[in-house]
Every structure is written in C-alpha cells, then in structure tokens.
Image: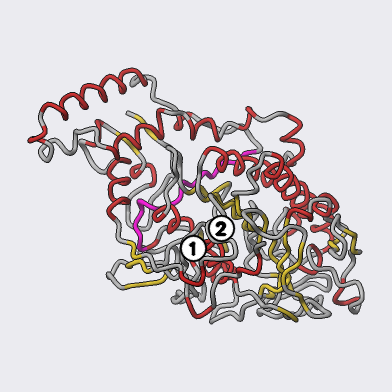
Amino acid sequence: MISIPGQSGSTCDGFSRREFLRIGGMGMAGISLADILRLQATASVVPQSAGANAKGGWGKAKNIMFVFLQGGPSHIDIWDPKPDAPSNVRGEFKPIKSNVPGIWLSEVMPQLAKQMDKATLIRSMSYTPAGLFNHTAAHYQMMTGYEPGRVSPSGQLEPPAPNDFPHIGAQISRIKPPEVPMLPFVVLPRPTQESNVIGKGSTAGFLGAAYDPYYFYQDPNQEIKLDDLSMRKEVPKERLERRATLLKTVESQMPDMEKAVEKFALDKYYQKAFDLVSSGRARDAFDLTKESSKTRDRYGRHTFGQGLLLGRRLIEAGTRFVQVNWPAVANGNPTVDAFDTHAANFGPLRNLHCPKLDSGLSALLEDLDQRGLLKETLVVAIGEFGRSPRLGVSTSGNGNAPDGRDHWPYCYTAMVAGAGVSRGTLYGKSDATASSPAEKPVHPVQLLATMYHALGIDPHTIVYNHLNQPRELVDARFGDPVTGLFV
C-alpha cells in the first residue's frame, strides 16, 4: 500500500482526509487517489471568455503563494505609518525609509524595508462587514470570494460544511492542476481558527473532498515527520513498477475487457497518482534538511519563517497554490504571538510578531527573486482586516486596553509581488489617519479576482454547486481584477 498523509479526523462529508488520499490494492476497495484524479478530470467547469480582462498581468503567474496573516495585523504599525497623526493614532513606532524613495515602513520592519523594490503595497484595502464583525466571517470572505451567509445560534459562523463556497486554491487546482506529479494545493502549518470554529472557508466546499487542500499541520521549525510521504516498506517501488508493467500488457492485449477491468487497469489517472507518490517529489519538497543553515537562518528559525521556506520549496516542486497561515490563531493571546492585539499592541508587535514577520517576508522575496521564481509566482500577504486607527476604542464590541487596537476592515494594507506586479510601488492611498481609502479602494474579493486573473483564469468563470446551480468563482458585485497592479 502507498499512502499520503492527511489530517486525522473527518472532512465535512464524513470521509477522513487520509481515506481520500490512500492507494490500496490498485483501487479495488473504496475510492483511491486515482479515483479522485478521475473525478477531477470530469468535473464541470464553464470557462467564460477573458475578453477585456485579458490584459494587465493576465496569465503571468504559474503559481500562487498566499501568506495569510490571520488575526488582523495592525496596518498603521507595520505597513502604513502616520507620523503626523495625533498620538492616539500614530502610536509608539517611528517610520523608516525603505530602499524605494517615498515608501516608508514602521521601524519594526527593517529587513523588509530593504526588499520593497520587489513588491507593491496596496494601502487601500477596504470592505464593510455584512453581518458578523469577526475573524471567521472575514476568513471566509478572504478565501472564497463570497460573504458568509449563515450563522449559528451562538453568533459565530458554523463549522465548514459541504455547501460552503470553495477556497480559491481548490478552484484553481480543479481548473488548472499542476503540470508535474505534485500536490496541487497545500495549507500549512496550522488551520485558520477563531475560538472553536476551525478552517471555515479553507475547504473545497461544494466541489467535494477530492479538491480539499493537503493539510500539512506540523511545525516546520521542528523535526518534520515524513513517514507517510514514503513508500511502505512491505510494498517497494520496484514491485509496484512490475505490477504497472504487467497491467499495461494486459490492457494492450485485452481491449474488449477495458470496462470490466477499469478498477484494476493502470489508466492515466492511476499513473498520475503513482507518479505523485513514487517520484518522491512531494516527500523531497517537505524535507527542509536539504536547505543550508544560512538559508534557514535567513528566514528565521521560527514556525512562520520555516513555513515560508517550506512554501517556497513546494512552489519550486510544482505545487500550484500554497497557503501559509500565521501560526497563532485569532482570539489568541497577543503575548504569545497572536495578531489579535486588543489587550496589548506595541510590546507584542515589537518583540514577538514583527521580528518574525520581518525576517520571513523579506527572506521570501529575496529568495524567490534570486532563484528566478518571482517572475512566475504571485505572492500575496494580507490579514482578514487591519486594526483601529484610534487606540483603546471599541469598533466591534470587543474590549480594548488603552494601547490596544480593535478590528478595522475599512482600511488596511496588503503586500503583493511577482508575476508581473509592479516593483517598488504603492497602489492606492489611505487618509491622514489610515481610517479609510483616499484613493483606489480595493475590496478583498477583488484581490482574489486578481489572483485568478494572474493565473489566466477569468474570475467570472461559471462553476456549478452541489445543487447544480451556476456560480461565478467570486462574487461579481465587488468588482473585477485590479489590473493596475501589473506592469
């Protein structure tokens, strides 16, 4: 038997991830990885004509690295300093120059400041919450391109469900699978979470479990266990190769029996599944011991930094969409690395959060650029929202300390780079207190539309949900791709 690891437990439709990614007895019992690949090939997608959208970065990206800073990092204290604002807005940090004239960052991001010639900052991200003003609702919208439609009696969103809108990575891996035998969509190093709601918006939803991401929930700063990414000792690769050769011979000499032996035949979908595991490509990509100590130190010897390095290795190996989640969860304790800085903002940002964010993002941009990967990899770093410009106020019903900042979706910042994105520029502008966009507002759904666009996928492509109803990849009410980001 060959197996690929997955998260223990069950998916929303009752099957465990491990069961969906297991090859056993050539698929004679249950659904195999080959079956999943076959289902993916027959899934219905109705592409729309790119039309006028086929411009400004169209098709420049081969893959996407989505850095999701869950918890809501403070834009004014990291990306968009306002030194001339009142003291209860500007906070404790001073601005520093970047290597691009006119672009200033907060003093807690000195290494990223040296890499800003490779990226664009969108300082006009903005949306008005529909209903719930919390992290989970924002996660769902940021990852699916649709507003959440249901809440539970507690006021929190319901857990992941089979009728959810699919994560963008699931849609992409369905429409544009990898060109080599590799995992198409990977999420690491832990799920998104708010309180007891885990992974909302992070599944394939109505596309079905075959398109769920590969969840790699290990700390890459610790020893990574690769046992499940290896051949089982009792079934060596040579034995499987001999079996494959025998089946090819049977197929060629008994074509009339093709339907009868479909479950046993080595068709192209089994071959893809076999190649994925036997090639060792995935196993090698997860092996950080193949990186030099200098490179690992540059990213930072912490969960976030090593997660970004692992993401780069997956992209390099052929994964189409990698999502690296900030490892501390919403509603966490900011003194142990959560961005949810209601109770304390400046100490945690200065001493914990930003040193890790700074080393990881700066190393990622530099590394991708030096390897030539930034030309074809779209990098997006963003949280679900920013933080209130005024200190100590309540904007979402939460209590806040005098130096704490509450949720603020009305204006915040995203960093984008690669795949034809303009280098060393600003897009949009916030007002004098970073409270609202002054120029070129960008809705987060537009940013998802831009990701599709960069891969050469029209975000208005029609897919059919579990009820066979037509749906666009993203909610068209919120606009088209931001083509002005590209050269």
For marks 1 and 2 on the same chain, the one whose residue lies earlier in the sequence: 2
Q: Amino acid at mark 1?
A: Lys
| Label placed on residue 192 | 2
Q: Quadrant of the C terminus?
A: bottom right
In-image side of 427 versus 483 (left or right): right
Magenta segment: does it hold 481? no
Q: Quadrant of the N terminus?
A: top left
Of 172 and 382, nearer the camera is 172
Image x and y of residue 149, in percent: 45, 77
| Label placed on residue 200 | 1
Disc 1, disc 2: CB below 8 Å?
A: yes
Image x and y of residue 8, in percent: 43, 44
In-image side of 79 versus 383 (left or right): right
Image x and y of residue 116, in percent: 79, 55
Task: Please tell me which residue is depicted at 51% across the width and 69% down the height of the picture.
Answer: 53
Of 29 and 424, nearer the camera is 424
Which residues fall within the magenta stretch? 206-220
Q: CA distance from mark 1 to mark 2?
A: 7 Å
